[in-house]
Image: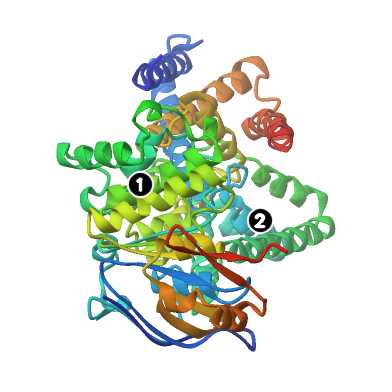
Amino acid sequence: MIEVKNVSKTYGAKYVVEDVSVSIQKGKITSFIGANGAGKSTLISMITRLISKDTGQVLIDGKEIGQWKSNDLAKKISILKQSNHTSLRLTIRELVSFGRFPYSQGRLTPEDWTFVDEAIAYMELTDIQDKYLDQLSGGQKQRAYIAMVIAQNTDYVLLDEPLNNLDMKHSVQIMKILRRLVDELGKTVVIVIHDINFASCYSDYIVALKDGKIVREGATAEIIDHHVLQEVYGMDIRIEEINNHKICVYFA
Amino acid sequence: MSNRAKLGSLFGLALILIATYMLIQAGGNWDYVLPRRGMKIFAMILTGGAIAFATVVFQTITNNRILTPSIIGLDALYMLIQTIVIFIFGSSSLFIRNGNINFIICLGLMIVFSAILFKVMFRGEGRNIYFLLLIGLIFGTLFQSLASFMQVLIDPNEFQIVQDKMFASFNNMKTNLLMISLVCFILVAVYLAKYMKYLDVLSLGRDQAINLGVPYDRVVKRLLTIVAILISISTALIGPITFLGLLVANVAYEFLRTYQHKTLILGSTLISIVALVGGQLIVERVFTFSTTLSVIINFIGGVYFIYLLLRENKS
């Protein structure tokens, strides 16, 4: 379990994340939603030690992140940020093989390569695994990075806006894969997501942030609610039930 | 051509150039010629390797292929030290005449400077590497301006001596300095060994490196320290020549087209040796010492640098 306790972060005098406490349950997809600048990305970066927190604690399986050895933590929790640009000339397979670094420190064993191949197959990239990253479309690139995180084989997988710049088809594909990661492999997935309909259809638990604080959290069905969303986004959002999914209509 | 074959041919080219350099126009005075030339070759291999290595590591840390470690101001500091000494004590002072003292003091001051810079920059929050580079750049400019200020004030004859120091030269190599440098390099290499594995991952950028379990701040700090030490040693030994690093590192990226540092570092070291030995051959045999090696390196490097900028701009 990931427990966030009273975590704050300030830039200058402004609180970006203020006294946030939340626990993330194992074996579920948890979505962080909220308007731009609500502190979602900052929070997820603090949970994964990409940026330091000013106060508070982040416990992963009961142990403070600062107490973990960096390499051991990399076998426990992985993070994929929204912009993954590299000028390196890498093939998909080479990129995915980096995911095994915490286990093999760069000298991959046959077992490591099995994980790499499985991760590539899981993301349906086997046919193009020897293509270079700069030859790929946005969706393929995103899948390649997710394959790297899968090869890292951590219990917790955190993704910061994994659907950024993807079309509908690839977005659905990626959300389905995340769902399978949870249902089939028993991973715990945390995503920062802007499209509340994806949050509604695929996540188990939703945490809504506003101005650096958690305004609401709860099971998906509780949060996808007219009044709650009004509070989070300040918008009048109609909610329709289609095929047993709650769909928010907010376009006009 | 596989990378192994490419490295092999580079190695072959380096050997041919070294052999040519050693044997050309020897005139039968083997006992005199070979040790002298051997010493220069040894110095070129040592400094060429150090600069190539330092530049590749530096560019990996900064994720930027058009930066060189000289941006943290070590070259400028070297020139400032030389100028101050000549300004205050004159060219006949012990410091200038005795290469050993000069070497030790320059080396010491450059390392102290980098240590202070890193200590201040890496303290507490907000240790952004680009901020460190910016501060280094500003100090570099300050040192350079101070040096030119003193250079215009001193006696023209003294300025000749300063000017001599401005260009890297392999012409007056001293065995004992080479030995000291060699020992330093070996110590650095031993210290470095356990950080080598992180280089490939670091080239993915900070976030990915941390995600993959690299103790980022510690590793980057250690690597930068090593870069500073290597650059200090080679500058104190032969003079400012870090531009060479930019050239060879980029040629290595283009030529080898890989992300693997063990290949890149080996390749850039070999290219560096080829450039230095080849350049020195041209200086000695074509220009008959009427120009210096760093002029040639800087000329070729400068043209290449402009090409890189234009190309980056296009993409």
How packed is label 1: few (under 14 Cα within 10 Å), some, or many (20 or more)?
many
Residue B192, x across and y down, in percent: 32, 52
Badge 2 sits on which subunit?
A: B
Which residue shows up at 26% across the image and 64% down it? A76
Q: Is residue B253 left or right of residue A73?
A: right
Instruction: Using the rendered image, report if marks 1 and 2 lie on a common chain.
Output: no
Residue A62, x across and y down, in percent: 23, 81
SS at mark 2 in the image: helix
Q: Residue type at mark 1? A: Met
In this orientation, does residue A33 appear?
yes
SS at mark 1 in the image: helix
Cα distance, mark 1 to mark 2? 43 Å
Q: Place residue A87 in its image quadrant.
A: top right
User: Are circles 1 and 2 on residues that touch, CB within 8 Å?
Assistant: no
Q: Which mark is residue B222?
A: none
Q: Which mark is residue A148?
A: 1
Which residue shows up at 36% across the image and 16% down it? B5
Residue sitting nearer the eye, B93 or A11: A11
Residue B294, x across and y down, in percent: 64, 35
Name the residue carrying label 2: B76
Residue B282, x across and y down, in percent: 61, 19
